[in-house]
Every structure is written in structure tokens, then in C-alpha cells.
Amino acid sequence: MTAQQPDIDYARIETAISFIVRHLHEQPSLEDIAAKVHVSPFHFQRMFLKWAGVSPKKFMQFLSLSHAKAKLQQGASVLDAAYDSGLSGAGRLHDLFVTIDAMTPGTYKCGGAGLMIDYDYAATPFGRVIVASTPVGVCHMAFEPLADTALAALYQKFPNANYQHARTAFQQQALDMFGQDWSCLRAVKLHLPASKFQIKVWEALLKIPMGVVASYGDIAHHIGQPSATRAVGTAIANNPVAFLIPCHRVIRKTGAVGGYMWGTARKQVMLGWETAHSDDAA
């Protein structure tokens, strides 16, 4: 698959943000960051502003530990308030638009036998994804720049399904969630193999507003199982649909970003981007 300009730009952004994170205490200059991605400071500033909506300097503030801790406190209060604090549609993006239908245990146990799965690839602000859907809804979304590797992972998940390379309405609705204009969004249906506990955890994640983060303990408390922090972490780690179920919004209670199935650097990129595009950043 030939790299497209959005993928090239994202690769530069990810490299730049990884550099910023490693040197955050030094507050690297625009010139230092631009040199890291081999472009001129002028070009990098324009590229970054177009992608993030804020300057690299402002973005550095979003990545600081103190900022993460402040957002954690906000996240806990939002969860405890049952998400009725007057948040806007953009703030509650996932909660308002994404619904989850559980796949029958038998279907998943049989490796998707009898399922027709359509799949396609797309560029997003955070890199290339593969997105797949059944006749019920989206069943898989993962960041992966290599088409063959992405498809192999999908085959491994549903080895006995029938596959077709095609873009469906379900997939397009999911990809529209990456846009910055959410005024015309339609409901996104997910069709996922999951236990009742996993569904409960993932539905709690959908309620974390854009630009806010929560801790694993916050999620455990919200679902009424405060001692299940470790199990919550496992359910989050097994999230099969990147971005749509916003597991990237869950961080450690210390404010540290923590791990992410699709890379810690990408998680930092997504959190910063969402902060820049949330109502709080306005």
C-alpha cells in the first residue's frame, strides 16, 4: 500500500510528539522539533497547526503531567455526576453516537463461521486503520500501516468467516467519527464479541467526554465494582475497536499515560488532539 500524504504527515506528527514527550522538561524549541522530522520550522508550524489546531508550544502544555492530573480530577467528577453536567454534543461524541451489540458467544467461539465480514482501509488523523463490519455493525478497527499485517490480524480473530474487500455504510459512519465536523454524524453500531463485564466497561468508556481522562479506578467505581480495577484494565486492553471505544482516555491515577494496544505515542497524540479540539480548549 503506497503511503498517502495524511499518513506521511501523521508519521511526522507522531515522531515530533514522541520527541516532545522525551524532552518535555527541556521545553524544546520549534526549531529543535522541526529538525527532528526533517522539515523547516515554518513548514512544521503550519503542518502542526493544521493537524492539531494549536501551536506545538500549546500542545506541550497538554502533554504535561500536571495537565493530565487536572484532567483526571475532572474525569472523576464527570463520572460521579453521571454525565449530566451540560456537556455539548462534541464533548459527549462517543456516548451520543456509538452503541454496542454483543456478538453471540457461539459465533465467536466458532471463529466467525457463517459471518460475512467486509473490510477496508482508510487514513485518519492518527494513522492508517483497517475497519471491518458484519451485517450488524463494525466488528474491528485497528491502527496498522501495513495492509497485509492488518488483514492477517483480522483473519486471526475470525478465521472461519467469509471476507470481502468493500466499504460499507457501517464502516463509513465509523470513519466519520474522525472528522472535525460532527454536525452530520449518524449513529455508529458496533458488533463485538464480548462478555457482559466487557460490555459494561466499554459502555462506561463511551461516557468519558472528549478532552477528559479517567483512571482505571474511576471506571471500576462507576460500574459498581470498585475492587475490579485489574479486571477493568484487562477489558480495556481487549478493546477491539480503536478510537470508537475511547480506551485511550483511560490513564494511570498518577497522571502517567500508561500503555496502549496501538502504541503509547499514538495514545499521547490522540489525547493531545482531543484536548485541542474539545470545548475546554476553546
Image: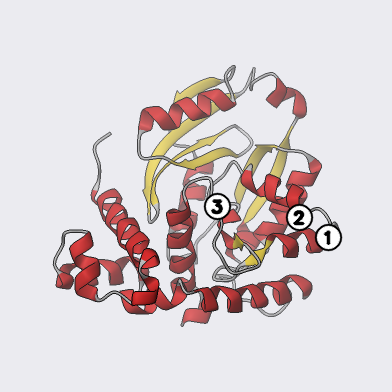
Q: Residue at x 57, y 44 (%)?
A: 241
Residue under pointer 3: 259
Does 127 sit above or below residue 47? above
> How many angstroms separate mark 2 from mark 3 (CA)?
15 Å
Does 188 sit above or below residue 95? above
The N terminus appears in which quarter of the rendering?
top left
Q: Position of residue 194 (x, y in %)?
A: 72, 38
Image mark for residue 226: 1
Query: In the shown orientation, is residue 230 left or right of residue 70?
Result: right
The tally of labels here is 3
Q: Is residue 219 visible?
A: yes
Residue under pointer 2: 229
Numbered disc 1: secondary structure: loop
For the residue pair 233 and 83, the one nearer the viewer reads as 233
Q: Are marks 2 and 3 in contact (CB under 8 Å)?
A: no
Numbered disc 3: secondary structure: loop
First reached walking from the N terminus: tag 3 or tag 1? 1
Q: Residue at x 71, y 42 (%)?
A: 101
For the residue pair 77 and 215, the one nearer the viewer reads as 215
Name the kind of residue labelled 2 in the image: Thr
Q: Position of residue 129 (x, y in %)?
A: 42, 43
Q: Position of residue 279 (x, y in %)?
A: 52, 78
Numbered disc 2: secondary structure: helix
